Image (spheres, grey):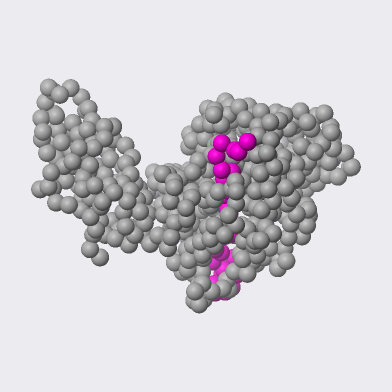
Amino acid sequence: MKPERLSLFGLLVLLLVSCGEKDRQPETEPAVRAEVQEVTAFDITFQVQAVQCEKVLYGLQEPLSLSWETGSIGPVSGTLKVSGLSPLTDYTLLVQGIGPQGEEGNVVRLPFSTSKGPDDLYPWEQARNGIPSFADLTLVTLGWHNYNPPKWTRERFASHVSYDGHWLFDAFLCIDGWDPSRNLSFSLTDSRYSAVKDSWQDLLDAWLGTDGALIQLDAAVADAATRLGNPPAPRYVVMSLPDPIRYQYFHDKNSSTTYWGEVNGKQLDFSKTADQVTAYRWYMDQCRKLFRERRFRHLELAGFYILSEELPLDPAFFRAAGQSFSSADTWNWEHKNWEILVPQAVNYAHSCKEGMWWIPYHLAPGYKAWKSLGFDAIFMQPNYYWDHDSVSHPLSRTQTAIKQYRLGMELEFEYSLVASVMADGRSGPDGSGSPTFYAADVPLLRSRVREYMQMYRDSGMYGQQPLAVYSGTDAWHQLASSTDEGDRAMLRDLCNFILDSPLKK
């Protein structure tokens, strides 16, 4: 395919930078190293490192005999992005260093091809200059397939939308792990049979159908807007992607790989990563289409979420990313293909100007390589809340990981935190699912949640990376509805922690 000349970006760009004293003679010839980080249908992101350069020239596809045009001022080394490319087009990225006395370094040439993008970008995508970001994200689990907890209502959503005269959560993660009507799993890490296309379609309808849960969320935001005025930005929605599981029953590697269903009349075979990606893209496109059809007043699709809480990867992927790994980090990787599936899903999402996020469990396989996989941000689960008898998930280990890899945190709790719920004598599970926590343990669990908040502050990532909040199926609303003084104090501390984040400003 013949390369096309860029009109938006222009012919070539000149990056002027200072690289030492001008009158100092270079010890070596000017040199640059360039590495492509991501190519979508419309953009290329690449990293440049320069040595003994007064300036770095970079451009696309034209011979160097043409003049270099003047561009912006910035650092010699860093990450750069060129936008305005055409889908399914071949290009060559050219990068050259120029020394302090005008010495010309060798030209680095990196051929690349843009991917196939979406058929159309929707208005909210066209209006974006980049991937949406948010300060905080609340996980809302569907649950309403079997009406336990009850179907989402605007009243139930209201406690997530605002608090004490303030807009509360910026973003809402729509997440569900299984199809109870068929007893099939959306998640590879579950032990059930794998969900089929009809399950995926029902999940779409539950969130985005004509009586879907997100209509109630939009109504709850509209109710709050009558008191607070319109929110400062749309309330973002992140849609979880069901795992395209290779086998109909993952634990039986002889089970069918053609169980899922068809797209455009073709039966998909999940032994082929291309077909797994096709299922991902089908679901993303259906989400995008339904967001357009619903014409929400206050909600906007921000992007997508990888459902599996662990991503074992090919050892070669870890090596290329410069990350250490253990056998657990690569367990069964050849049957999961995450190192192929996730970057391709991210690439397509980014082509649609949509983001991609992930929440691994505590120190789960893949978290160290999150940037190489292409995620826009990830949130680490501490899992400390559910420890019983002995602490197997010390917050110090979570804090170390968060600081080293610049992660967000998931703040976790469920109904066992709510005194007014536990007062009827019910039990709450520990990390293994055993009934462990009772009403007498509510003070302990409250103290753990407060430890989460302090740890995130101490990590230095509070206000630097976004926060996710997991409150089980309904615990946030249960706290907000409680008349127990301890419950109300717990909710106040949680809301203040969210509202006080510097990212919220």
- Which quarter of the image is occupied by the N terminus? bottom left
The residue positioned farthest toward the right in the image shown: 424
Give how far across and how far down residue 309 sits, in percent: 58, 50
- Which quarter of the image is occupied by the C terminus? top right
Magenta residues: mostly which secondary structure?
Answer: loop
Q: How many marks?
A: 0
Give the left or right position of residue 505, taking residue 108 as reference.
right
Front-lying residue, 314 or 165: 165
Give how far across and how far down residue 204 sits, in percent: 62, 61
Magenta stretch: includes residue 239: yes
Do we see residue 394 in this rendering? no
Front-lying residue, 473 or 380: 473
Residue occupying the point 78% across, 31% down = 488
Magenta region? 229-258
Give the left or right position of residue 331, taking residue 444 as reference.
left
Magenta stretch: includes residue 234: yes
Give how far across and how far down residue 347 sits, in percent: 42, 54
Residue occupying the point 24% across, 47% down = 10
Front-lying residue, 317 or 372: 372
Residue occupying the point 29% across, 60% down = 89
